Amino acid sequence: MNETKIAFTVDEAAAYTGIGRNTMRRLVEWGKIPTLKVGRKILIRREMLENFVELNEGNNLRDKVSVKAVTR
């Protein structure tokens, strides 16, 4: 069976996009990527990640002001 995930943990999202884990955690903390919280686990939908990467192409992801937030 070949399953495709529709949501990732923060670490999985970092690996999927190539963004560092700490940077991904910071982006979530800043509210730049919409998340779903299930207990202590934070999930990020695949389509939100893809939209985020496309929207912020060329931006410095470590600069809170220059990073554009993805909206649903």
Image: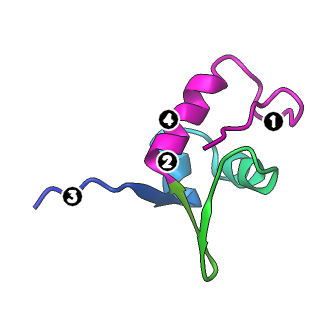
Q: Which residue is mark 4?
A: 50
Q: Within 10 Å of the Cα at label 4, are there few (<14), some (14-19), or many (20+) other Cα atoms?
A: few
Residue 3 - label: 3
Separation of marks 4 and 3 at Cα, in angstroms: 18 Å
Q: Within 10 Å of the Cα at label 3, are there few (<14), some (14-19), or many (20+) other Cα atoms?
A: few
Please state the horizontal and vertical placement of residue 27, each as a whole percent of the image: 74, 47
Q: Which residue is mark 1?
A: 62
Snapshot quadrant of residue 10 = bottom right
Query: Residue, x 27% and y 53% (percent of image)?
Result: 4
**SS state under label 2:** helix
Q: Which image quarter is the C terminus in?
A: top right
Q: Is residue 34 left or right of residue 7?
A: right
Q: Nearer the viewer, mark 2 or mark 3?
A: 3
**SS state under label 1:** loop
Q: Nearer the viewer, mark 2 or mark 4?
A: 4
Query: Residue at the front extreme?
Result: 72
Q: Is residue 10 above or below residue 27?
A: below
Please state the horizontal and vertical placement of residue 38, each as a whole percent of the image: 57, 77
Query: Residue at the bottom extreme?
Result: 39
Instruction: Look at label 1 and name its amino acid.
Output: Arg
Mark 1 and mark 3 in contact? Answer it, CB < 8 Å: no
Which of the two discs, 4 and 1, labels the residue nearer the N terminus?
4
Query: Residue at the top extreme?
Result: 58
Query: Residue, x 60% and y 34% (percent of image)?
Result: 52
Q: Which residue is mark 2?
A: 15
Query: Residue, x 73% and y 37% (percent of image)?
Result: 69
Q: Within 10 Å of the Cα at label 1, are there few (<14), some (14-19), or many (20+) other Cα atoms?
A: few
Instruction: Look at label 4 and name its amino acid.
Output: Glu
Instruction: Look at label 3 and name its amino acid.
Output: Glu
Q: Which residues are magenta?
A: 45-72
Residue 59 shown in magenta: yes
Which of the two discs, 1 and 3, labels the residue nearer the N terminus?
3
